[in-house]
Amino acid sequence: MDDNANLSHENPGPEETCDVGAIEKLAYDLWLARGCPVGCPEVDWFEAERQLNGTRESSGLSRPATQSQ
């Protein structure tokens, strides 16, 4: 078995730093809010990731603050 096969799961990149459980819960809530449509679960998953990443960015956790002049 290749030792490098699971490296992406052990060392997540910046786009994977959100808590999967938080994404899962928000995606489920978004799906419920849309009326539980069949198919395309990635729509809610990607929207949940976007919202959570936006929350992190706006709180200054993922990017350093810039100084205004």
Image (cartoon, rainbow, N blue to C red):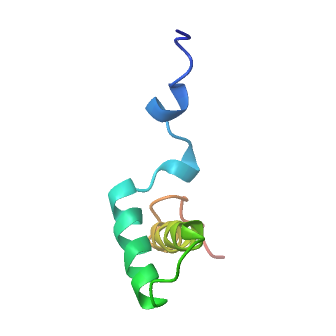
65 lies above or below 31: above
Q: Position of residue 14 (x, y in %)?
A: 56, 48
For the C terminus, the image quarter is: bottom right
Q: Residue placed farthest to the top in the image?
A: 1
Q: Identify which residue is drawn at 41% across, 64% down.
A: 23
Q: In which image quadrant can residue 67 be found?
A: bottom right
Tell which of 51 and 4 is nearer to you.
4
Question: Viewer-proximal residue, 28 or 49?
Answer: 28
Relative placement, left or right, of 47 versus 17 is right
Residue 4, position as x, y percentages in the image = 56, 17
- Where is residue 21 drawn, in percent x and y? 33, 58
Identify the residue at horizontal 54%, vertical 32% (top origin).
8
- Outermost residue, front direction? 38
Does residue 67 sit above or below 1 in this rendering? Answer: below
Q: Where is residue 7? Give x, y as percent.
A: 52, 25
Residue 32 appears in which quarter of the rendering?
A: bottom left
> Number of numbered discs present?
0
Q: Residue at x 58, y 66 (%)?
A: 42
Could you say which is closer to the camera, residue 23 or residue 31? 31
Task: Tell me what residue is drawn at x 55 percent, y 59 percent.
Answer: 63
